[in-house]
Image: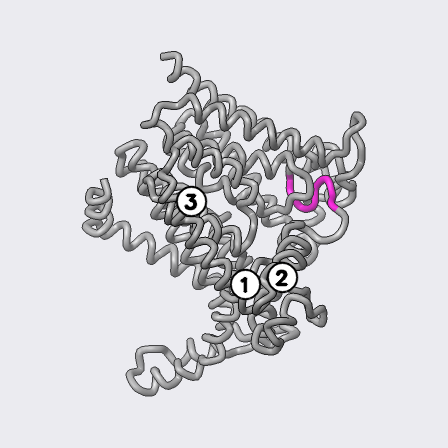
Amino acid sequence: MRKSFTGLFTKNWQFVSVLILGLLVRLLLTRYGNFGDVALFAEWGKRFFDLSRLSYYYDRNWYYSYPDYPPASPLLYAGLYWLYERRYLLAEIHNAIKIIPANFIIYFGKPVPNDPLQFGYGYYLLLKLPPIFADLGISVIIYRLIFRLTRSIKKSFAGMCFYLFNPLTVFLSAVWGQTDQLVALIGIISFVALHSNKAWLSLPLMFISLFIKPNWILILPLYLFYIYILKPKVGNLMSGLLISLVLFLLLVTPFSESDVLGFTKSVLLGSILPVAKGTPKASVSAINFYSIFFSVDKTPAAKEILLLPISYWGYTFYGFLNILSFKYLTNLRKEKLLEGIIISIFIIGLGSFLFLTNMLERYFFAAFPSLVILLAIRPKLTKLLLILNLILLANLVWAFFRRSVGVINHLFSDYNYLLVRILAIVATIAFIRVTRYNLKRGEARISG
């Protein structure tokens, strides 16, 4: 299988051309959207060198906000700032061999207009490269997984292109500069490695995914259950745990020195695991189930409905979706487990976004690569999956521009968030129908 895939990829110029085109489209768009979250990441990278390592997570004198991601993210941004500070090398290369255009060198160091910290376009380009390259990686994995499930080059290539040129993925990586794609890439590879009996590799990858940004912690119960189903060798698991521990110490030590336990308790458990700051809301900026009934970013998650806080209802829905997925996977034949885990990631990833409280607009992304794969392997669900894609894209656009572009904000929020409520109803119904179809299809195969 590996040889056939590699042969298809290396011999067909279309694959390389599509990847290059996808990269160029994203690079051209990096000049836009250099504010908000990516500006926050830019400050984290610079101040890594301004502060002592021991005070980095504890200092509160930040222009935007103090770091609330695990250590892998600040270290990544610090490395990118280190590269940006050495941009003079571009000029030296140009003077020596003229391979880098002078216009690009000028652009790279040119400060972004109205940027309070006066960072250049080149720094923001560097900050957006990890999610951009992650997009390329996910598109290749999507091709490979679709090919393994369908043996169709046409479907595999279509799925790859659909992901790579999807306005949703392009906007999130090239304009917004979020790390969700990077987290998803490593998380998906972790599941693939586990499925391929490489728990020693899978466990460290899952750890790195969580230690960049803990989005996939909602997929962790599924991951642990998949370990239970596959039952890898104990030595394989122990090797993975040991590598993960070493990685943990390497990433935490720069910020804690010898007080690893104290840092873990006060920073990792005390500041980072709570996903959002402030009072949890039923719906923050996610067009999800709670947006049907409550105003976005206003209703507390502690509000009681039928004697239970809304957040507890969210946990109940989340637990129910996990149980459904576990039961579904348990009954599958071994040769159908890969398809089953892709469907389960979709159900839990998008279900968490729809039914858990305090969700942000980007927290669906763990499910998105699975959505693209489902488009290829479940043609009867094409209309529902495309509708979900459009709603998720609309959610991103509204969340990103609602504070800066009045027309977009009014479109979604006027008439008591009428459009948001309509989209939330449609998204919830579409998700339930897609989930029912896949679970029933699994039951039919079992009974057959």
User: Residue 335 magenta-drawn?
Assistant: no
Q: Give the residue at mark 3.
A: 188
**Dot 1: element:** helix
Residue 204 placement (x, y as % from top left)? 43, 51
**Dot 3: element:** helix
Residue 376 placement (x, y as % from top left)? 37, 33
Ranked by sequence position, the earlier of labels 3 and 2 is 3
Ranked by sequence position, the earlier of labels 1 and 2 is 1
Determine if residue 430 is in view. no
Q: Give the residue at mark 2.
A: 263
User: Is 85 placed left or right of 139 in the picture?
Assistant: right
- Residue in view at x 58 percent, y 44 percent: 394
Q: Marks 3 and 2, Cα distance to the nearest angstrom? A: 29 Å
Magenta span covers which residues?
Answer: 280-287
Which tag is nearer the camera, tag 1 or tag 3? 1
**Dot 2: element:** helix
Q: Residues within 10 Å of mark 3 (few under 14, many from 20)?
A: many
